[in-house]
Image: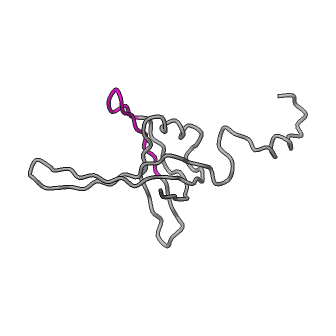
Amino acid sequence: MYTLKGSIKTIKATQVVTDSFSKREFVILDESGQYPQTMLFQSVQDKCEMLNQFKEGDSVEVFFNLRGREWTNPQGEVKVFNTLDAWKIQPLSGETKTAKTVAEVEDDSSGLPF
């Protein structure tokens, strides 16, 4: 298990690959080091929906597994592919675009009932 903190640069639509497999890709920008790093993640199956609560620009922590596989092309060359497979995302600021914190709800001094 690995984690990475950064901001969401891109969230793509869910892709239905087959009747039994779907994935959703998203890009995280990590600016913690000397040079910014742009990382492509994917979520699969029921984990695709966890991205619905986030928007581009949100600061998040991504929990993921590193996956790798070999593939032999038609010319006989062996290629290795790596995938960052995200299984949990949580906001760093404690907020998302659809949720209010308890402090925000309690501090609502507008007087409106809704």
Residue at horizontal 58%, vertical 53%? 60
Q: Nearer the viewer, residue 36 or 76?
A: 76
The outermost residue toward the left is 75
Q: Is residue 20 magenta?
A: yes
Up-down relation of residue 84 to residue 24 (above or below): below
Q: Is residue 72 magenta?
A: no
**Magenta: main secondary structure:** strand
Up-down relation of residue 78 to residue 50 (above or below): below
Give the extent of the magenta segment: 15-27
The picture places residue 74, in percent across and down from the top left corner, at: 10, 47
Q: Nearer the viewer, residue 12 or 94?
A: 94
The picture places residue 85, in percent across and down from the top left corner, at: 42, 49
Q: Nearer the viewer, residue 97 or 84?
A: 84
- Identify the image's colour scheme: rainbow, by chain, secondary structure or one colour: one colour
Total number of numbered labels?
0
The outermost residue toward the top is 19
The picture places residue 31, in percent across and down from the top left corner, at: 52, 64
Residue at horizontal 65%, vertical 44%? 96
Residue at horizontal 48%, vertical 65%? 36
**What is the quadrant of the C terminus in the image?**
top right
The outermost residue toward the bottom is 34
Q: Nearer the viewer, residue 27 or 16?
A: 16
Residue at horizontal 57%, vertical 43%? 55
The picture places residue 7, in percent across and down from the top left corner, at: 55, 55
